[in-house]
Image (spheres, rainbow, N blue to C red):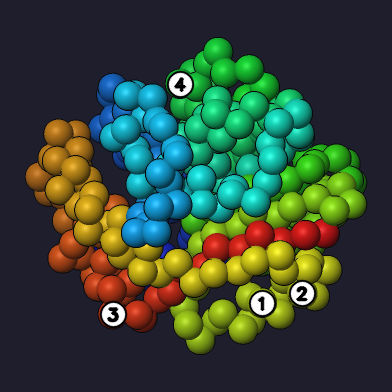
């Protein structure tokens, strides 16, 4: 199973959706306290990028995952805007950006109905925040209705990435921002750049953040392990280590040894 987690993006496309279903069911069944609201590798910086970010005590445990969202969203002023997140997972990033930056509306969309049900019962009383089930390749929104689209650590899972990029472009208003981050194999970076350009996007900033992700995983590995130990049966620890990218896992090594990069993009329609 940990091999399946490692090789997910190379699996035949028809297998990926059912695998997500199984994965979300497992997390939901083990996370009785509903404390797992992020599913990303996180971001840490040495350059003072987060010196002014004061998190509430309840958000401290998710600091590195939050910092990834904060980094991805750094060039966008959310106040009063309409925002869509595709692949919002368990909603931690959507909740963080909505609570701290006050968009008019923030819609989290995910392919998994299980995770949408989770989000709708877990992230209540956050003004402007809602979650809907949907597919990256067929976004259920009219043309030119969003000021920004957020997408964190999700696109590599999609069957048709160019179709996803063209859908994002379609739903964005003129001058809207696409705030995108994901792991990308070094040999695929040029392909992704070309697909973004062909969809019509202009690059405002792009950055290889692999070292920031490695740093976050180093700093967060002990916490991630203890979180896994407190929830999952021992037989699944290795698989969850792999998914969580803790030090010693193949996923961590792939980042650390540069077999896989991690890029963040701020793009403009
Ligand atoms: C690794 S998780 C990241 C979740 C969240 N962005 C975070 O950082 O915590 C990837 C998410 O993408 C969702 N996903 C996968 N394929 C999708 C698709 N085709 N359309 C929409 N969501 C999808 C999965 O269900 C999962 O919740």
Which residue position is annotated with label 3? Answer: 257
- Pick the front one: 179 or 52: 52
Secondary structure at badge 3 equals loop
The vertical placement of 191 against 170, above or below, is: below
- Pick the front one: 82 or 21: 82
The mark nearer the N terminus, 4 or 3, is 4
Q: Are marks 2 and 1 in contact (CB under 8 Å)?
A: yes
Label 1 C-beta lies within 8 Å of the nearest ligand 1 atom: no
Question: Is residue 166 in view from this perspective?
Answer: yes
Q: Is 154 displayed left or right of 49 in the figure?
A: right
* Residue 102: quarter of image: top right
The mark nearer the N terminus, 2 or 4, is 4
Badge 1: how crowded within 10 Å, few (<14), some, or many (20+)?
some
Residue at mark 2 to residue at mark 3: CA–CA distance: 29 Å
Residue at mark 2 to residue at mark 1: CA–CA distance: 6 Å
Q: Are marks 1 and 4 in contact (CB under 8 Å)?
A: no
Which numbered dot is residue 197? 2
Badge 2: how crowded within 10 Å, few (<14), some, or many (20+)?
some
The vertical placement of 95 against 10, above or below, is: above
| Foreground label between 2 and 4 | 2
Which residue position is annotated with label 1? Answer: 193
Look at the image and tell me in which quarter the N terminus lies: bottom left
Residue at mark 4 to residue at mark 3: CA–CA distance: 37 Å
Which numbered dot is residue 122? 4
Residue 266 horizontal/vertical position (percent): 66, 60
The mark nearer the N terminus, 2 or 3, is 2
Going 83% across and 68% down the picture, which residue do you hit?
Answer: 200
Question: Is residue 134 in view from this perspective?
Answer: no
Extreme bottom residue here?
Answer: 187
The mark nearer the N terminus, 3 or 1, is 1
The vertical placement of 232 against 190, above or below, is: above
């Amino acid at each position: 199973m940990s091999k399946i987690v490692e090789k997910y993006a190379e699996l035949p496309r028809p297998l990926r959706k059912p695998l997500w279903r199984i994965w979300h069911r497992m997390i939901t069944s083990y996370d009785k306290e509903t404390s797992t609201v992020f599913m990303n590798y996180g971001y840490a910086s040495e350059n003072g990028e987060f010196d002014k970010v004061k998190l509430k005590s309840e958000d401290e445990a998710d600091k590195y995952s939050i910092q990834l969202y904060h980094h991805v969203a750094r060039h966008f002023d959310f106040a009063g805007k309409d925002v869509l997140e595709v692949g919002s997972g368990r909603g931690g990033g959507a909740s963080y950006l909505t609570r701290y930056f006050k968009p008019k509306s923030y819609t989290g969309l995910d392919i998994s109905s299980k995770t949408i049900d989770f989000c709708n019962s877990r992230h209540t009383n956050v003004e402007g925040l809602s979650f809907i089930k949907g597919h990256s390749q067929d976004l259920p929104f009219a043309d030119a209705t969003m000021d920004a689209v957020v997408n964190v650590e999700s696109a590599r899972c999609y069957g048709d990435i160019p179709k996803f990029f063209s859908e994002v472009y379609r739903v964005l208003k003129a001058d809207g921002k696409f705030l995108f981050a994901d792991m990308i194999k070094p040999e695929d970076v040029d392909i992704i750049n070309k697909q973004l350009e062909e969809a019509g996007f202009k690059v405002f900033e792009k950055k290889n953040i692999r070292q920031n992700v490695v740093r976050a995983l180093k700093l967060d590995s002990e916490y991630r392990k203890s979180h896994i130990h407190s929830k999952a049966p021992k037989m699944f620890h290795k698989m969850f280590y792999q998914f969580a990218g803790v030090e010693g896992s193949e996923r961590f090594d792939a980042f650390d040894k540069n077999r896989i990069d991690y890029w963040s993009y701020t793009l403009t329609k």
